[in-house]
Image (tube, rainbow, N blue to C red):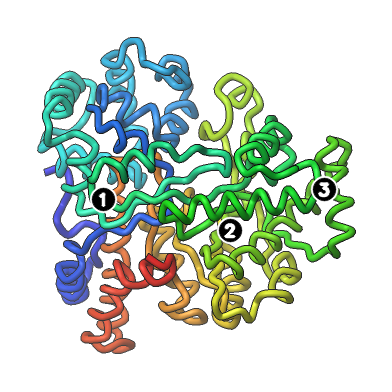
């Protein structure tokens, strides 16, 4: 076995027994994946995944980021290529460097997929690279490993994609038209139309204007176009928006001030301070729209994206060279919260890459404002240690019920069950400790475990 059945449970035998019982209570629950970056086209077309390298290596920045840090060329990994020219060569290169992932959550996710989804038992290495490649390739050619069949076998109840306002959503429409009953929903991600630093910012806005019939050269037309785009997403089941701004800064300008600022931004004449102010204002505008249309708002701040200009210029955005930075929430969110913080019908889910804010800022904020909830450990911290730190630093102030369960935030489809399994094991380990220390009754722990794995995420995301 590549994985021990008691992995991630407490070392103390008595506490481990409690954790095991809690896990048995929740491990078969359906998966709710309310935030991720898988592609709706996979399920619309339902074509076989081409090969192991395309399935595991190419879409997963956790993998090629680590390999790149050790001098492996991204060209040699097929990154940025529409079709990998020699997938077996890429796979062997990956296998040769698999030791780099020792002790990382990536190793645990991959071993889970290899063992549970493909029945492999020997350790992945340069020696077993071809065995793995051939075994996985053979299975991928069978009907049981088509995207829709895998979706069903993973026991996924809801899966969401992340899409810009000008996306046609044609693949979501095709899924619905096919009669397949799976719930694969879009998520509204307006960054490309609200962040002036996007290279195609003005073109994106123009495209959104064409799709909605609005004059996006004006502030009013721009806002109307965003509202119409949100409505189009809602028609296909969308329940949430997502905002990946550099900071959590918000603003509350008058209509005249906002219109003047938009004119400068649209004309390409805004300086960096004005661009920051525009992004801040747009977070507040998005909250206003969520009050009106009921979409849950997710804020994912704190990532200095495309930190490596060489990689960005050669391969484009979101290629693993993003770095966390310190993030302020207390003062940054105040303009938004002054307007909407007491709206019981509004849900804003806050994420962070700055763990120092958990107990100092985020837990107290979510423990007070009716509209705020805490998103789970994210990105650099969706690890066993990161998940445990999240529970330890937020529960004492925000409790469990101001959090929203787990979401996997992944581009790698086959990692979804593994990531949820890790989250459920860590939550059960944390709850088992509370029971063992007489801080929580065991019957309550069973109820909380179920809520963390299933109930809270459905409620928070209105699913």
The image's mark for residue 182 is 1
Q: Residues within 10 Å of mark 1 (few under 14, many from 20)?
A: some
Q: CA distance from mark 2 to mark 1?
A: 27 Å
Q: Earlier in the sequence, mark 1 or mark 3?
A: 1
The image quarter containing residue 391 is: bottom left
- Is there any visible trace of residue 435 in the rendered image? yes
The vertical placement of 396 against 376, above or below, is below
| Residue 180 vs residue 215, the one in the foreground | 215
Q: Is residue 243 left or right of residue 236?
A: right
* Residue 216 x, y percent position in the rendering: 74, 43
Left or right, residue 215 beside residue 68: right
Using the numbered discs, state the Cα–Cα distance from disc 1 to disc 3 in whole angstroms.
40 Å
User: Residue sitting at 26 percent across and 73 percent down?
Assistant: 450
Where residue 12 sits in the image (x, y, percent)? 21, 71
Q: Nearer the viewer, residue 268 or 353?
A: 268
Q: Residue at x 82, y 42 (%)?
A: 265
Q: Earlier in the sequence, mark 2 or mark 3?
A: 3
* Residue found 49% across the figure and 37% down from its top: 168
Residue 369: x and y in percent read 60, 80
Residue 107 visible in the current orientation: no
Question: Which residue corresponds to mark 3?
Answer: 262
The residue that mark 2 highlights is: 299
Q: Residues within 10 Å of mark 2 (few under 14, many from 20)?
A: some
Quarter that holds the C terminus: bottom left
Q: Residue at x 56, y 80 (%)?
A: 344
């Amino acid at each position: 076995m590549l994985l021990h059945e008691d992995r991630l449970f407490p070392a103390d035998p008595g506490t481990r027994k409690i954790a095991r019982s809690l896990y048995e209570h929740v491990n078969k629950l359906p998966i709710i994946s309310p935030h991720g970056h898988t592609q709706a086209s996979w399920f619309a077309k339902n074509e076989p995944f081409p090969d192991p390298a395309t399935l595991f290596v190419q879409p997963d920045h956790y993998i090629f980021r680590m390999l790149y840090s050790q001098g492996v060329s991204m060209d040699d990994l097929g990154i940025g290529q529409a079709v990998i020219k020699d997938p077996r060569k890429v796979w062997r290169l990956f296998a040769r460097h698999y030791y780099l992932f020792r002790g990382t959550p990536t190793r645990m996710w991959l071993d889970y997929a290899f063992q549970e989804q493909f029945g492999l038992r020997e350790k992945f290495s340069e020696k077993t690279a071809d065995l793995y490649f051939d075994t996985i390739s053979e299975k991928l050619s069978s009907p049981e490993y088509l995207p829709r069949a895998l979706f069903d076998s993973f026991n996924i109840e809801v899966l969401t994609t992340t899409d810009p306002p000008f996306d046609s959503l044609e693949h979501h429409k095709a899924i619905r038209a096919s009669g397949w009953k799976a719930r694969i929903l879009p998520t509204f991600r307006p960054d490309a139309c609200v962040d002036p630093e996007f290279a195609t910012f003005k073109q994106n806005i123009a495209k959104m204007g064409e799709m909605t019939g609005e004059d996006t050269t004006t502030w009013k037309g721009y806002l109307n176009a965003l509202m119409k785009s949100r409505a189009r997403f809602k028609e296909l089941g969308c329940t949430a928006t997502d905002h990946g701004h550099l900071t959590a800064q918000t603003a509350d300008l008058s209509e005249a001030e906002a219109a003047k600022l938009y004119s400068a931004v649209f004309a390409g004449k805004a300086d960096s301070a004005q661009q920051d102010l525009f992004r801040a204002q747009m977070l507040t505008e998005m909250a206003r729209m969520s009050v009106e249309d009921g979409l849950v708002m997710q804020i994912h701040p704190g990532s200095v994206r495309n930190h490596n200009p060489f990689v960005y210029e050669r391969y484009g955005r979101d290629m693993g060279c993003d770095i966390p930075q310190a993030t302020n929430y207390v003062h940054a969110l105040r303009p938004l919260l002054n307007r909407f913080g007491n709206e019981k019908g509004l849900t804003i889910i806050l994420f962070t890459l700055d763990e120092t804010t958990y107990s100092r800022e985020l837990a107290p904020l979510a423990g007070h404002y009716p509209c705020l909830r805490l998103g789970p450990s994210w990105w650099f911290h969706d690890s066993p240690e990161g998940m445990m730190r999240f529970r330890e630093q937020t529960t004492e102030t925000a409790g469990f019920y101001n959090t929203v369960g787990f979401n996997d935030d992944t581009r790698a489809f086959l990692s979804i069950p593994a990531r949820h399994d890790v989250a459920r094991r860590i939550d059960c380990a944390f709850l088992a400790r509370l029971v063992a220390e007489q801080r929580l009754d065991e019957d309550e722990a069973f109820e909380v475990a179920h809520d963390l794995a299933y109930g809270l995420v459905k409620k928070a995301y209105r699913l």
